Image (cartoon, coloured by chain):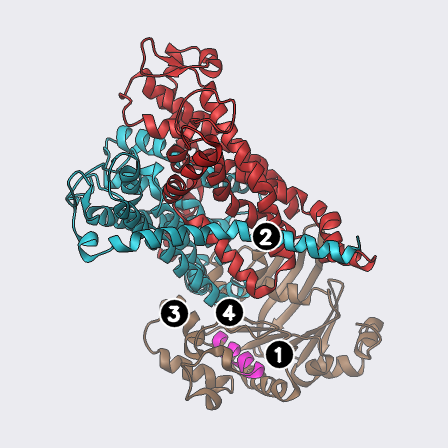
Amino acid sequence: MNFKQIKEFIIEKAIFLSGSLSIIFVILIFVFLIKEGALFFKYVPIKDFLTGTNWYPLSTPEQFGMLPLIMGSLLVTIGAMIISIPLGVACAFYIAEVVNPKLKDVLKTGVELLAAIPSVVIGFVGMVTLVPLVKNIFNLPTGLTALSGSIMLAFMAMPTIVSIAEDAITAVPRRYKEAALALGATHWQAMYKVIIVAAAPGIFAAVMLGVGRVIGETMAVMMITGNAAVIPHTFLQPVRTLTATIAAEMGEAIRGSNHYYALFVVGIILFIITFAINFIADVFLHRIKK
Amino acid sequence: MNSKLTQKIAFSFLFLCALITIAPVLLIVVIIVVNGISAISWDFLTTSPTNGMRSGGIFPAIVGTFYLAAGATVISLPLGVMGGIYLSEYSKDNFFTRILKLGIVNLAGVPSIVYGLFGLSLFVIYLKLGASLVSGCLTLAIMALPAIITATDAALSSVPQSFREVSLSLGATKWQTIRHAVLPHALPGIITGTVLSNARITGETAPILFTVAAFYLPHLPGSVLDQVMALPYHLYVISTQIPGISKSTTYGTALVLIAFTLSLNLFGIIIRTHLRRQKKW
Amino acid sequence: MVAGTVKIQTHNFNAWFDKNQVIKSLNMQVYSNEILGIIGPANSGKTTFLKSLNRLNDLDIKFKMDGEVLLDNKNIITAIDITALRKKMSIIFALPLPLPISIFENIVYGPRMHGIKTGLEEIVENSLKASYLWDEVKDRLNESALNLSGGQQQRLCIARSLAVEPEVLLFDEPCSGLDPISTAKVEDAMMELKKKYTIILVTNNVKQAARVSGRVAFFLMGELVEIDFTEKMFTNPQDKRTNDYISGRFG
């Protein structure tokens, strides 16, 4: 081998290694979460963890029932989806099908900028504007509620839902629409009878990824949902999510304590949930490409 | 009701939905600018916080965020670009590539707080780097990676296949071809992707919570093993943990933060639009 | 007899894309300093043959080949140093494919890749003169190659190939996108180039083959039907299929 071929060989290996990094990191993340979290189950039975209704990590005896956190995340996510799915999909249709090209660029840029606003800023703005508003409208002792969290999270899920749903709608073959129009349907009829069906897998993937985004969101929810680790019964109660629990408590958890391990287990649960969601979304997106 | 009218109503409804989706961007920016502009002064930008962060400036946080963004870019850019080159130029259509793409999608979907835990576990504890600038940069770099890989892959794939054929036909090796006939023409797209992805991680709080961010540290870091303050975390701290802080200080901090991230984003979007217009092939 | 020595010869050369055999048991010779025209209808395997010679088909993972293709008696199918092979056999593609960089940089691209750092100006001048483009572009070498007309671009591509000092020039329908005047200029260049190089010209244009090539090969469905001197082939073809094609009955 000459010098050129040796250089080529080394570069190719380096590129292959970099290419594999994504897999390596996904595995590393999982391994290191397990490494810290696994010890937890030596002390706390997995059943108590998953079904316990009390999260009192600092009381004696300490209790690590995760149900309130799961319910908190679930409630906030459901609320956010109720708002963002119809709005986001409608917005995607508007951008993909109705609007003129010039305004289209403006709207897409707007959606992109919404994604660019840091979550701590969204949390802050929610805290100073939305929270007092919710408090006054519903006459509550505090405006830091699941509802406030859902509303802010809905906007954070929007960029994901809109951009991926829009891609899916744009990818629908023109002939479907033309066929509908040729049969005398109006543009709107073609949209809700033909295009939405053809784009359904992509829209579903968009919604899934939106859910993933919402479940994983941390700072904004921590700032506006009140952080009370109790099982919620309405949207007008404070809740605490999985993510906020880690962010709020890791700072004071003593390294090596059950509490510390428990927070890593919460991280593992989050990782598994988002992994599953992304996997499903990917399967649907892959189906469209074929 | 006739179908034309239905369509008109439906389209107006869609327009309204789009408006509700986009409007918050403007609203958030306006609220922050109106309330925060009065806090912005030369002193605010160039001095350290004083009086338990109730007064003074945010200089250490600005510098910290700048260091984090720069450090994360330095680490993630070469790795991400090489990863993108692998996907676009070397990978075959097989099971490994399928898994690789799934890995990228999932890496992009890992919640930011989980990145924080991972950084804590691997860099801070296992590699004994402690809560430090280097731990924070590494954590953020991994977070930025999937977007850079994806952008690089897309930019390279949009370079016509003929460029590669021409270069190879002249006796260039595969790497020479990528380096001289493909990469230069994909560079603008790669830069855009990197700017957009790093603008996003610059605003992240959760990944730096346990890996680098200092609650209050009124001086600049002396080495990469020091903690730093960072704008997003500082905003979180002063808006939730410091009672009685003046409104304009928090809004001012928020203003500096969104100015930082939004201008990076706009910059990225502008190069991209510019590129699309003058595409040569 | 043909003047010159055998430059390229094939023995039972076969090529496939997936299961589809595109070249069937090809046996032929190419002599140095001749222009061999290869004609035939679409999908007859002519371009595949051309791209096999400098191993450009390798880019397609579905491509497979076996048999022997000897360049100066060395089998290129088993060649290890493919970059050296491609440097010897330079291809000019059907469409002019200048890289979106300056005229100068296009021509020195190949030499630079082979580590040449000095005398680049001279290489550019010589290559452009040999491809009959020098007079038209000598004052604007730093302009983008994309500003040239189609015919000029194709002659630039010829110059770019010459700059790597090849031994064989492979033309893949080089005039398919050009007007008659540009075509004439490219053909003039070819006639001049055969003094120094061996040229294989794949063309869809039977008249072009008749104008410039010394010998002509007729490919059909991956088979070599007939190969002979141009005059003989066009006046007295041995195979009926050749006659049908030349007289325009199919293709």
Camera-near label (2 vs 3) is 2
Residue A19 higher or lower than C54, as above or below: above
Secondary element under disc 4, as helix, strand or loop, is: helix
**Mark seen at residue C35:** 1
Q: The disc numbered 1 marks a residue on which chain?
A: C
Q: Residues within 10 Å of mark 4 (few under 14, many from 20)?
A: few
Residue C66 % position (x, y): 63, 54
The secondary structure that dominates the magenta segment is: helix
**Mark seen at residue C112:** 3
**Mark seen at residue B16:** 2
Q: Which residue is mark 4?
A: B277
Which of the chains is red?
A
Q: Earlier in the sequence, mark 3 or mark 1?
A: 1
Q: Residues within 10 Å of mark 1 (few under 14, many from 20)?
A: many
Labels 2 and 3 touching (C-beta < 8 A): no
Look at the image and give the colour of chain C: brown
Residue B133 % position (x, y): 24, 41
Task: Calculate the distance from the C-alpha at mark 2 to the C-alpha at mark 1.
Answer: 70 Å
Camera-near label (3 vs 1) is 3
